[in-house]
Image: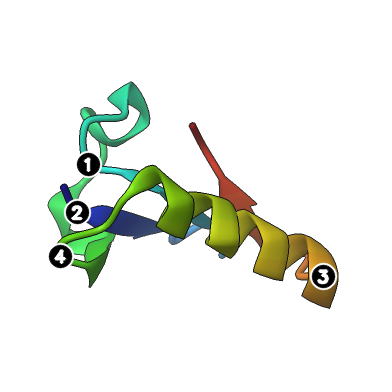
Amino acid sequence: MKLLRYEDPKTYIHTYGMEDNPFFKDKNLRYVFTVKENASLQDLKDKEHDIKHLDLTYDRVVF
């Protein structure tokens, strides 16, 4: 499964999640990027940890 990133063109917030997450269903594909092709839930948890550890204001994770 793919790990995706959505870059909101208005708020500049990056949202990370797995491709089967409903969050990505209605998003413009122009702003959706593949971060990792064969990702697991652990990759998403690692991304969440990195965001919290680095205190990244404009990055989010959706499960």
Q: Is residue 1 above or below residue 34?
A: above
In the image, what residue occupies the spot 27% across and 61% down? 31
Using the numbered discs, state the Cα–Cα distance from disc 4 to disc 3 in whole angstroms: 24 Å
Task: Residue under label 3, please give it.
Answer: 53
Which mark is drawn over residue 19? 1
Would you say the residues marked 2 and 3 are in contact, meaning their CB atoms lie under 8 Å apart? no
Would you say the residues marked 4 and 2 are in contact, meaning their CB atoms lie under 8 Å apart? yes
Using the numbered discs, state the Cα–Cα distance from disc 2 to disc 3 in whole angstroms: 23 Å
Query: Could you tell me if residue 57 is visible in this image?
Result: yes
Left or right: 59, with 27 as reference point = right
Which mark is drawn over residue 52? none
Which mark is drawn over residue 37? 4
Query: Could you tell me if residue 13 is visible in this image?
Result: no
* 3 or 1: mark nearer the eye: 3
Task: Residue under label 2, please give it.
Answer: 2
Would you say the residues marked 2 and 1 are in contact, meaning their CB atoms lie under 8 Å apart? yes
Closest to the observer: 35 or 45? 45
Binning the other alpha carbons within 10 Å of mark 3 as few (below 14), some (14 to 19) or many (20 upward) gives few
Q: Secondary structure at mark 3?
A: helix
The answer to which of marks 2 and 1 sits earlier in the sequence is: 2
Binning the other alpha carbons within 10 Å of mark 4 as few (below 14), some (14 to 19) or many (20 upward) gives few
The answer to which of marks 2 and 3 sits earlier in the sequence is: 2
- Looking at the picture, which amino acid does disc 2 mark? Lys
Q: Position of residue 10 (x, y in %)?
A: 52, 56
Q: Position of residue 37 (x, y in %)?
A: 15, 65
